[in-house]
Amino acid sequence: MAKILETKLLTKKFGGFTAVEKVSLTVNEGEVRFIIGPNGAGKSTFFKLVIGYHTANEGTILYKNENIEKLKLHERIKLGMGVKFQAPGVFSELTVLQNLKLSDNREKSFNLDNLLSDFSLKDEEETLAGDLSHGKKQWLDIALATLSMPDLVFLDEPTAGLSFEETKKTGEIIQKLNKQGITFIIVGHDMDFVKQIATRVSVLHLGKMFFEGSVSEVLSDKGVNNIYLGVG
Amino acid sequence: MKINIKKNKLPILIFLIFGIVPLFLDSYYLDNISYFMCWSFISLGLAVIWGMGGVLSFGQTAFFGLAGYSFGVISINFIGVPGVGIWSVFLALFITGIFGLIVGYFLFYGGIYDVFVGIVTLAITLVFETFMQQTAGPEYTIGVARLNGFNGMQGMPTIGFQDTKFGLVQGITQYYFILTLAAIILFALYKFKNSKIGLIFLASKEDRDRVASLGHNVKRVQLIGFVIASLLAGVSGILYTNWGGYITPSSMGLVSAALPVVWVAASGKKDFLSVFVGCIFLVWLSQMLAINGAQFAIIAMGLILVITTRFFPDGLILRAKNILINKIKWLQ
């Protein structure tokens, strides 16, 4: 599999605090990569560095072997990325359909009806996004990130606040989209969700890359258990 | 251009009423309504940048004044030249648009947002006012056009075609010209609001970063919205200058800058038709109150702003419009 994203020694400092320190990561096409770690591990900062929300102090970001550090957020998205931030980023004063129209930013896109059905939003097309339940807001947010058939999608905490059934369904949708060619990088906490869909897991701790491996390798690693899973 | 009559019964009705008003009113009242309508364009511009884009510009009068003075300077200097009553308008609007582009560029690409946009734009209009107030001396002349300080500039020719019957924008021609222009601009603004770029602009009000994360250049879209608002303020400035035959520095002062904000907030900044109707009503109200002293009008406008903000955050006229549509089935 070809590399879709590679970061080399990526570092971000906020004043005297180093949020991300020399993180090197390689993600191949077709992966569902999870980035996990305790609170304050630098997961969301790393995610925001890659998409261009923050600017790195040091290091390199290669997307499909092209250096994208100088590109702004919207320019990186145009290259074929999709993003969902941690807080639901739907536009509450717009309808579901209007929200999705905003996401239609490339020449190719998924069939809107199919996507709406997958995310159980078919009957809510004209509903204001602000009136949706929390779960449906999360799904609409994921739909916004994926509608334009990006090659790489970043999801920050896509199942936060979702019920067990909703989390399971979210996993199924992500797997379906993954089979259709989308590579995912997901920041998450929920280990059941990780077990359900992850193909590989990277563990961050205190801003540094702590461990990387398959789900079973991560679960069986004593260090990870000690710092993150609370078993040791 | 296709207008869906079924969906637009209320605006069509309103414009039909305005259209037949001249049959019942004499020229004094028509000139007055023309004056009220002059201000609707600066208000519509504010509804674009504030109501749609969530960026409160407190200094739209800077563009109003710039357009008015530009029109005055150009038309006075080229008086007698064929077509000056037409092309001077476009040239003045061009200057205003370029100035809007420069100001907007430094604002949005400079990372100035929220309340700071209001502060910067207010500062610009106050600097303009202060500068123009001290231009009374003969040295402040551009070509043959004297800026004339506190008393303002006058003597500009009327907009339109000099040798054509009803060709000059004055009297009843002025009334219908402004009314038609308002209808065209309202139509265009609704088209803009429903376009992709309008949708991006609307969404940027809620979350700029999220819009950018969907691949849109938010700063560029905000700049476009700001330039549209500047141009609409410029249209008001030119029509106002043409209406009275003068433009003064006070038109860019603090009170003048604050009034459009009150009109738009009280009318309902999210709805262009409400802003158009509300602006006409509130300028009329200001004029009525000003008969007993200009201060009364300002106090009343302040009160209206407080009441609206507290009890009708979506706007009084918009609330009235929604009630009207709900009560009268024919309008639905």
Image (tube, coloured by chain):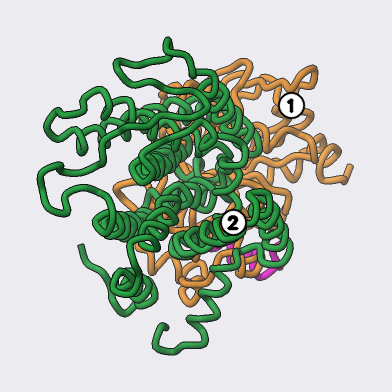
Chain colours: A orange, B green
Residue name at image x 19 percent, y 33 percent? B84
- Residue B291's tag is 2
Query: Residue placed farthest to the top in the image?
Result: B139
Secondary structure of the residue carrying numbered label 2: loop
Answer whether residue B53 is visible to the viewer in this image. yes
User: In front: A15, or A196?
Assistant: A15
What kind of element bears circle 1? strand
Is residue B194 visible in the rendered image? The answer is no
Which quadrant would residue A36 be assigned to in this image?
top right
Give the image location of residue B279, x and y in percent: 50, 58
The percent position of residue B205, horizontal first and vertical second, equals 55, 48
In the figure, B228 relative to A19: above or below? Answer: below
Q: Amino acid at mark 2?
A: Ile
Q: Residue B239 occupies which quadrant of the picture?
A: top left
Q: Nearer the viewer, residue B25 or A175?
A: B25
Name the residue tied to disc 1: A19
Image quarter in which the N terminus of chain B is found: bottom left
Q: Quadrant of the C terminus of chain B?
A: bottom left
Is B240 on the left or on the right of A90, as rendered?
A: left
Q: Which residues are magenta?
A: A160-176
Residue B71 is situated, as x and y percent measured from the top left of the image, at 32, 32
| Amino acid at dot 1 | Ala
Q: CA distance from mark 2 to mark 1?
A: 64 Å
Task: Indicate whether residue B315 is drawn in magenta.
Answer: no
The spot of residue A94 in percent (x, y) is 51, 61
Residue at image position (65%, 52%) is B293
Lateral position of residue B105 relative to residue B318, left or right: left
Residue located 38% across and 69% down the image = A113
